[in-house]
Amino acid sequence: MLSEFGYILLFIITAIVFTAVILFVAKLLRPNRPNVEKLTTYESGEEPDGNANVRFNIRFYVIALLFVLFDLELVFLFPWATVFGNETLNNSTDGLWGWFAIVEMFIFVGILILGLAYAWIKGHLDWVRPEVQEPQFKSPVPISKYEAINKKYS
Amino acid sequence: MELTSTVFTAKAIYVGVIFAITLGVAAYSTYFERIFAAFFQDRVGPDRAGPFGILQPLADAVKMFMKEDFIPANSSKWLFILGPCLSMFTALMTSAVIPFGDTIDLGNGVKFDLQGIDVNIGILWVFGIVSLGVYGILVGGWASNNKYSLLGAIRAASQNISYELAMGLSIISILMMTGSLSTKAIVEAQQNGHWNILYQPVGFILFIICAFAECNRTPFDLPECETELIGGYHTEYSSMKLGFYLFAEYINMFVSGAVMATLYFGGYDYPFYETVVNSFGENVANLIGFGALIGKALFFVFVFMWVRWTLPRFRYDQLMNLGWTGLIPIAMFNVVWTGLIILLPAEFNLSSWASIGVAIAGIPVLIVGLFIYHSIAGGKKKKTALAR
Amino acid sequence: MQFWYFLTALTLISALMVVLSKNPIHSVLYLVFTFFCISGHYVLLNAQFLMAVNIIVYAGAIMVLFLFVIMMLDLRRNSPDSKTNLTKLAGAVVGGTVLVIFIAATRKINLGTGADNAFYNSQTGMVENLGQILYRNYLLPFELVSILFFVAMVGAVMLGKREAGERNF
């Protein structure tokens, strides 16, 4: 089994060598004539305004925290999934083991769902929606003209 | 010693072949993406380089190599280079545990597995590498020191971690069917037509949605959505580094197609396997199995492109709502329902047809549940809207 | 055995680089690399499930959270020179105390002469055996863990409260 992980090492080394070789070859082939304009930060053609150390929404941070907790829950579920359908355990308990396992997992997941529901109700999973603004512009051309054109070319 | 060295050489060749296949498929999926786009939009598409434009990927590669590459003055140079390399690296690593085929007899009693590594934790390896995929984007986006890049990277990271959870939960319902984390065991449990898609229709839908989100494909391509963020996390990239990012996306598409085929569509299983073994021998049959897996993966690549040119992009709040309040509860429901799929027929000594019946019965139950939830929550929303 | 020495050296060097590098992002990336090396150690111990979990949870989840937090900070303002002598002194005292505690704790451990074959089972680290033990013998702690997660989740939600008038992206 350990030698199998040796092949993982083979994979890792091949992937690293591959990326390094491609980058190196590209470096040899391409021209390199930098100037100040080329090296500035792209900001839609404007002069860049400050640097990119902007504070972003704290929701991203809450999402990451929740993700860590749910990831841990997943890690607990993986070994559970392997023993859930275990034949010998099932046969020795006359089929009761499966029901027992699913109930114990249901309690575990249920408590976590409570946590998710709490975050949900508190509004941490709601993101800012764009506010649709109705245009206030009134066209001098009457609507019926447009409709006539639409009818003509539809 | 002789035997191990033969196996080692075979493995080394195999690793090379797998890399060549993934890269070749990735290169040609750029071509086919453009062909399909042209077809869906009633255009001609690439037709200049070679007959039918078949040499277009080569021309693109040459362009990627020859373009000038600049590293913005404000960026952190080494992280700027590291970002795309990490993306490419994580994209290449997943294929190590996918069982591309059964064993091949090399003669002299040497059996050779058409699988990079058969480890006890195969599917966890896939899951771990997928969770590392965030780094390439996050590091690249931050190192650019560009606001659009940073926002794109943060979006990509949040999206990936949100959809990873539902993906993991749908993997767990597969594991409950099989009882093993080894990808080989998962495929072997599905031989002779017992494909998991029959028992896990909801799980498959969840998984394919999450695969779209993990690959940052439309309708989930918000990290690089050009109307809002210019190029997203790769705004500042050019030349081969940009090529790495784009390439990693196509490799991810192919590999996630292969993973879906492994988990839900029987891997290298195909109908009439026995007849082929009887008339042509086992090696030929297993090589056809290899082809079958690649074919299934390519079909999923086609689905990826088809969806891209069919569906519009999500808005960001819709995306996060779908991930957290849609997919995760449904995935948890699916885990519990999978327990019933396994336990109910065993309780009453029924055949596997009963399992399929229970699995299909899950879909209407889910739809009714969603409908009831929607009518309750929708009523509340209307009330609050009126109160305002 | 030679591979073990190589891996250990790599782990120690990258762990040192976590402390020594000035850019916090570099530190995080070195820490991720350190976790990878530790996963390599788990493989050598044939604890495959732990290896995967180490990658998924530590490298894949917790370090992403760290990166998020560090990206939220303004790095220019928190340059290393801004630390006062008092913080440096406090850091030295805390670190030194931890070192003393570790040395004191490991001083009396008897490492023995090697694996005891009578009790050694190479399959202990497999996920099936882990599941058997966790969901039969240690069921109550397992259920209590979910309460712990719940508390942590509520805490995370409380932390994420927005203050009025905050402007950010």
Image (cartoon, helix red, strand yellow):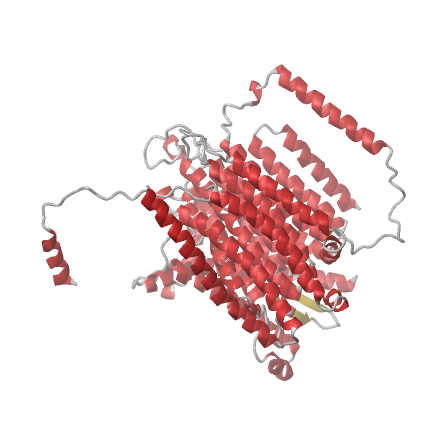
Q: Position of residue B289 (x, y in %)?
A: 59, 72
Residue drawn at x 39%, y 49% is: B380
Q: Give whichever of B281, A145 is nearer the camera.
A: A145
Against C131, is B317 above or below?
A: above
Return the residue nearer the eye: C21 or C64: C64
Pinpoint residue B260: horizontal percent, then vertical percent.
54, 63
Q: Is residue B58 visible?
A: no
Residue A56, x across and y down, in percent:
45, 35
Q: Where the C terminus of chain A falls, by quadrant?
A: bottom left
Image vertical order of residue C106 relative to residue B375, above or below:
above
Give left or right: position of A49 versus A136: right
Query: Is B98 drawn above or below residue A137 in the view shown?
Result: below
Residue placed most toward the observer, B327 or C169: B327
Side of B382 where B14 appears, left or right? right
Image position of C107 (left or right of B66): right
Which residue lies at the image location 70% right of the left edge and 23% below the top edge? C94
The part of the image, by quadrant, that contains residue B218 is bottom left
Q: Nearer the viewer, residue C97 or A28?
A: C97
Q: Position of residue A89 (x, y in %)?
A: 75, 64
Residue at point 57% right, 22% down? Answer: C80
Classify the position of the N terminus of chain A by image quarter: bottom right
Residue A79: tell me if it is visible: yes
Q: How many marks?
A: 0
Q: Judge left or right: residue B157 versus residue B232.
A: right
Residue drawn at x 33%, y 62% is B38
